[in-house]
Amino acid sequence: MPAAVYIGDGAIEVRHIPIPALGAGDALVEISHCGICGTDLHLVLERYARPGSVLGHEWSGTIVALGADATGWELGARVVLDPTPGCGHCRACLRGRPSVCLRREPPDLLDFSRGAFCRFKVAPAARLLRVPAALSTRAAALTEPTAIALHSVNLAGVSPDDRVLVTGGGPVGLLTTAVLRSRGVREIVVSEPAPARRERALAVGATAVIAPDELPRAPMGRPVSSPFTVAFECSGHAAAAESALDQLDYAGTFVFVGTGSAPPRVNHNRVIVMEQTLIGAYNYDAAGFRPALELLSSGALPLDRLIEPVDIGLDEVLTTMHRLAAGELPGKVMVAPEAPA
Ligand SMILES: [Zn+2]
Ligand SMILES: [Zn+2]
């Protein structure tokens, strides 16, 4: 099957690799769509990925074969893969954070050897979730990043009367904004340097947008004149995180969502005297992907503005990654790997 394979040195090539073997409890899924994630950009453009990796983890597809023990499914079923559940009993799981379950092997953060920028993927049938009838298979590829956005919003305990700042208007910031809007948050300001992304942020639910250099510096030990009660840092840039912390009110909550290579400087004195809470949001809630599938199929999210209108083929993955990194494409780009056989 054709696959977009990372070959090292920041390069991707379409190569033919074997279709993975089907175990007794597995389903063979033909990938319909797979979104390009910020993680994929870091792995390729910053050259962390291992040569030979096939990236892409935000996928949806259709079952085309079933192992002998894979029950409860039929060929043609439209599916996404639920994340591995936590043990349910450790300290992390009991606090609703199965992403960091303590009874799990520490994750290999560079293991992206079996992603979905390819035509077929094998998955345990017991962990597949059916895509609701009201949701297209294409839009179902937004399930994983939507689950990420739900997790960060839930961890922050946002309520409708919060005044929320989102820094970074790329796909993660846009989804976070749309999820906040679906929760009835009345004031959502998105800070983003690229005009096209600012415009898209307004289209997906931001109530105002601002260029990062318009955000004020904070006076010592006191809030800015219009502070925020919650901030989601979705850009991964140190300067954005530092500025977002400056905008936070007394007892405000700051959530790190976007990863980046240079760490921000945190003024601990400010965090102390203003009693602020800093949270890291890594993956998903204990409920897995079901709430994300429900939200996506509810019609509450502007799917056509969260997803870029033109899907790309496997041969366009690398050039598109460069365009995403340059901020040219505001929404989620979907790879459609259906092959010329
Ligand atoms: Zn992702
Ligand atoms: Zn656990």
Image (cartoon, rainbow, N blue to C red):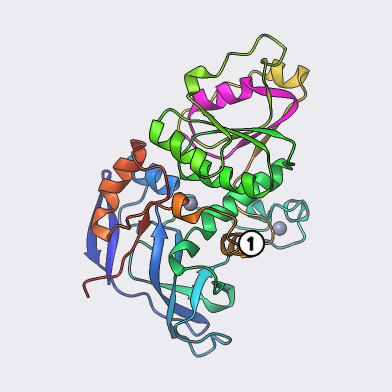
Q: Which residues are magenta?
A: 235-260
The answer to which quarter of the image holds residue 314 is bottom left
Residue 153 visible in image: yes
Using the rendered view, name the quadrant where residue 146 is placed. bottom right
Above or below, 137 against 189 in this view is below
Residue 338 is situated, as x and y percent measured from the top left of the image, at: 30, 70
Q: Quadrant of ligand 2?
A: bottom right
As rendered, which of 149 and 178 lies closer to the eye?
Answer: 178
Answer whether residue 282 is magenta in the image: no
> How many discs appear?
1
Q: Label 1: how many residues lie within 10 Å, few (<14), some (14-19) or many (20+)?
A: many
Q: Is residue 265 above or below residue 297?
A: above
Q: Which residue, given by chain and number where applicable, does mark 1 sit on?
A: 288
Residue type (three-letter) at the residue carrying disc 1: Gly
- Give percent across and percent down for residue 254: 66, 32
Q: Quadrant of the N terminus?
A: bottom left
> Please, what secondary structure does the residue beneath circle 1 have?
loop
327 w.r.t. 113: above or below: above
Name the side, left or right, on which 261 lies relative to 119: right
- 246 drawn magenta: yes
**Residue at x-position 50% and y-position 87%:** 74
Q: Position of residue 245 (x, y in %)?
A: 62, 24
Residue, x 43% and y 49% (percent of image)? 37
Name which residue lies at 40% across and 60% down: 34
